[in-house]
Image (spheres, helix red, strand yellow):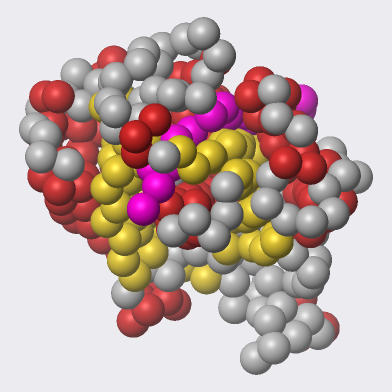
Amino acid sequence: MKDVVIRSSGRYLPEKVFTNDHFARFLDTSDEWIQERTGIRERRFAAPEERNSDMGTKAAQQCLERAGVDASEVDLIICATVTGDRIFPATANFIQENLGNRTAWAFDVNAACGGFIYALSLAYGMLASGVNRRALVIGSEKMTSILDFTDRSTCVLFGDGAGAVLLEAVEPADNPEGYGLRNFVLGADGSLAYKLWQPDGGSVNPPNPDSLARHGHYIHMSGREVYVNAVRTMNAIVEDVIAQAGLTPEQIDWFVPHQANKRIIDSVRERLKMPEERFVVNIDRYGNTTSGTIPIGIDELYTENKLATGQHVVLMTFGAGFTWGAVYLKWGDPLAAG
Ligand code: ACO
């Protein structure tokens, strides 16, 4: 087995900012309610002509530039998304085309807010087993394409954006400190699939006038039930992955949680008795970017020079499916020059 390290990261957020007051103009809601119940102050919405694959490409290009790796040197591209450009082919293929790569195998992972952790774990498996050498793992969402702007309980929660990481396999002998991705806790419970879903648009109910009339091609969510399950599951998986790593919560330098609701993040943090400074939070500025939240969070740490070699990092998520996942990694790049 090879070790698998994160070489670099990148992110892209659309330019246009929408504050909570924007929604209060046409919905029965308020800045006060949204901030208090979710922690969101504002989010970014992509321009109509801006595609999911455009955002994913920009995040991926930044990632490659920072690592000094040419797109042609990547042999696996995975895009986690539930808002791909088209049902098929995969958005990963459009990103591949934009990057000018003609050889990698490329596909999408559909696991909603669990998507990036699922994609990262899959890429780990391919690199650790020696099948591939370098992987781009992207989380990219144009959530505005499936938001019902007449439903105050969902449309205020989400935003558009993308993040990416570049993974590379290294020989354990060249990585004596054991940097890279180390422990994984993944799961799903399909019995709860209908608690958070997009009812129409697939083959059971292809788009038709009825589905448009009942807003079936938008997100439908039982918010309370998702909330309760998210808190319970995130608490369990974060404890599990830290125990698997043979560490204690106090030894974890950075937690990068999925950003669905600041109250969910706080409840996990409080149970672990961790200070706010160790938790990456961007929901206030970007809302829930679904597959984008975790790679965007990693990139914020990366570009703000907050990640020091040898630090312990835990990523964790929960989303539609229900899907969940937590990853422990030791930050460091044995391949970096100097
Ligand atoms: N403004 C004002 N009032 C609102 C709004 C709003 N934007 N949204 C809902 N309300 C109202 C409800 O209608 C309800 O009113 P009622 O009592 O008159 O019926 C009241 O507020 C309370 O509603 P709850 O749903 O109980 O509110 P809650 O405090 O649970 O917050 C929320 C709702 C924010 C959706 C929360 O349940 C939540 O964050 N759920 C989890 C979301 C999540 O984790 N998603 C997973 C990832 S997404 C993915 O995978 C794609």
In the image, taking residue 51 as reference, residue 76 lies left or right, namely: left
Q: x, y percentage for residue 102?
A: 84, 54
Residue 12 part of the magenta segment: yes
Q: x, y percentage for residue 50?
A: 85, 42
Q: Which one is nearer the viewer's eye here, 20 or 337?
A: 337
Residue found 69% across the figure and 45% down from its top: 74
What is the magenta segment's predominant secondary structure? strand
Number of numbered callouts drawn: 0
Q: x, y percentage for residue 231?
A: 24, 50
User: Quadrant location of residue 215?
Assistant: bottom right
Q: x, y percentage for residue 186?
A: 31, 61
In the image, taking residue 231 as reference, residue 57 lies left or right, namely: right
Location of residue 153 with respect to 74 vertically, above or below: below
Residue 108 part of the magenta segment: no
Q: Is residue 60 something that shows in the picture?
A: yes
Location of residue 178 with respect to 116 vertically, above or below: above
Q: Which one is nearer the viewer's eye here, 306 or 153?
A: 306
**Farthest-out residue, bottom:** 204
Residue found 28% across the figure and 26% down from its top: 177
Residue found 38% across the figure and 64% down from its top: 323
Residue found 65% across the figure and 39% down from its top: 162
Q: Is residue 145 something that shows in the picture?
A: no
**Farthest-out residue, front:** 173
Task: State which region is magenta.
Answer: 1-16
In the image, taking residue 65 as reference, residue 137 lies left or right, namely: left
